[in-house]
């Protein structure tokens, strides 16, 4: 079970929790996820929003295999190439956690990724059950 610490206005507006308390449950350590192709195999290199949607879909699929879903995420580290995409990412992330129980989070700008066309990578930790 996860308890999401009270969010102030700043945290609510940026779609993250200042802390998440867990006890028990199954911990899932999620590898960094990137995407340059969507579910249909279309090239989404250079398309930030398509990459965000695809990455969250892939994370959700991984967590469902473990018995949870995106709502099980307690923390995430987000790496983006262009700092101007930060606000758009925050807007989009909020839509993936409609109950307002956002994971704790860090948003980090990087100078490059492993492959051309990658604009974002997300890794995280989830706790399922408990």
Image (cartoon, rainbow, N blue to C red):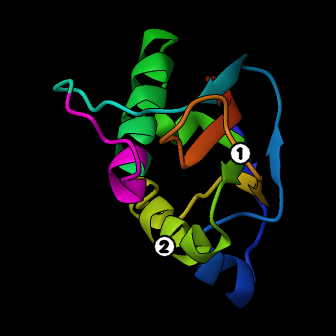
Q: Position of residue 128 (x, y in %)?
A: 61, 23
Residue displayed at 61% across by 23% down = 129
Q: Earlier in the sequence, mark 2 or mark 1?
A: 2
Q: Position of residue 15 (x, y in %)?
A: 60, 69
**Mark 2 lies on residue:** 88
Please say whether residue 91 is one of the residues in the magenta stretch: no
Asked if residue 22 lies left or right of residue 40, the reply is: right
Magenta-colored segment: predominant secondary structure:
loop
Residue displayed at 32% across by 50% down = 50
Q: Residue 112, labelled with which disc?
A: 1
Asked if residue 13 lies left or right of residue 111, the reply is: left
Rounded to the nearest angstrom, the CA distance separating label 2 from label 1 is: 19 Å
Residue count near mark 1 (Cα–Cα under 10 Å), binned few <14, some 14–19, many ≥20: some
Is 115 rendered above or below residue 64? below
Q: Position of residue 62 (x, y in %)?
A: 47, 18
Is 100 rendered above or below residue 52? below
Element at label 1: loop
Q: Quadrant of residue 104?
A: bottom right
Q: Are marks 2 and 1 in contact (CB under 8 Å)?
A: no
| Magenta-highlighted residues | 42-51
Is 49 rendered above or below residue 7? above
Residue displayed at 70% across by 42% down = 74
Element at label 2: helix
Residue count near mark 2 (Cα–Cα under 10 Å), binned few <14, some 14–19, many ≥20: few
């Amino acid at each position: 079970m996860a308890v999401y610490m009270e969010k102030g206005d700043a945290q609510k507006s940026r779609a993250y929790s200042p802390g998440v308390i867990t006890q028990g449950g199954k911990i899932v350590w999620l590898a960094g996820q990137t995407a340059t192709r969507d579910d249909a195999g279309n090239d989404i290199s250079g398309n930030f929003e398509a990459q965000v949607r695809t990455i969250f879909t892939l994370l959700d699929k991984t967590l469902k295999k473990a018995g949870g879903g995106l709502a099980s995420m307690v923390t995430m580290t987000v790496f983006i190439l262009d700092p101007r995409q930060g606000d758009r990412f925050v807007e989009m992330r909020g839509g993936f956690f409609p109950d307002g129980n956002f994971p704790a989070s860090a948003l980090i700008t990087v100078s490059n990724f492993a492959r051309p066309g990658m604009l974002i990578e997300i890794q995280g930790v989830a706790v399922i059950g408990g």
